[in-house]
Amino acid sequence: MAEIDLRLADGVRLLALDGKEVDSDKLLGAESRYQLDNGTHQLLVEYEVELVSSGDEVELETSDSFILLLTSSDQLLRLGAPKIGSRHEFKTFDRRGDWRLHDASGSAHPFKLDRLVKEGFQLGRDYERELELYNSSGSVAAYRPIPQRVFTTSSQAVHRNSDQPAGRGSASGQALVRQMLLYWYNQADPDTRRQFNAWLSR
């Protein structure tokens, strides 16, 4: 397996992935599955649950939209929510955002969580525009994709201003360096990571 195998439990609906809306024809009671590239991803999800009212009528409740930011590599991950059987339990979940993300062994996988809030009527939301604004705000679960760059060993690519010391640069440049290091570290297999860590400790 050379990618992330993401599975969404019953009731979990993926609205957008990495800032782009997702067309979903998922039916309630079915598990969804997505194959993602290794690295960092932003999920916009909501939770739908059928609740029985006092009159024995079944009503569908839908949570707020939540943003999850996760980083993974070569893993199976399952995203779900606690079992909900009452309106009180649903409201508690919607207030706390008690999402559960686990790997194949059942261990909790870390992620950052936030709520995508929109005031007023919720019909016809433009999730891509809302996420664009959210991601530009620098909030806790903001997604900053790594630019696709072509690396070359030509003299032009390795040329550096002689007045600027090696390894130094602007804060934004160093932030990009950190992102690239994290990205390629996550791409590496365990043996390559061990070699890299050994090199760092010399």
Image (spheres, rainbow, N blue to C red):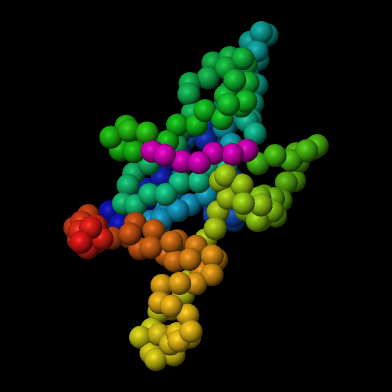
Depth order, front residue of 195/24? 195
- In the image, residue 91 sits, relative to residue 145, either above or below, namely above
Residue appearing at x 55%, y 66% in the figure: 172
- In this view, the residue farthest toward the bottom is 155
Please say whether residue 112 is one of the residues in the magenta stretch: yes
Q: Is residue 57 left or right of residue 122?
A: left
Where are the magenta residues, as a range? 109-115
Count of numbered labels shown in the rendering: 0
Q: Position of residue 165 (x, y in %)?
A: 43, 78
Query: Is residue 189 something that shows in the picture?
Result: no
Q: Is residue 133 left or right of residue 37?
A: right
Residue appearing at x 57%, y 44% in the figure: 140
Q: Position of residue 178 (x, y in %)?
A: 43, 61
Residue appearing at x 46%, y 41% in the figure: 111
Residue appearing at x 42%, y 65% in the figure: 180
Q: Quadrant of the C terminus?
A: bottom left
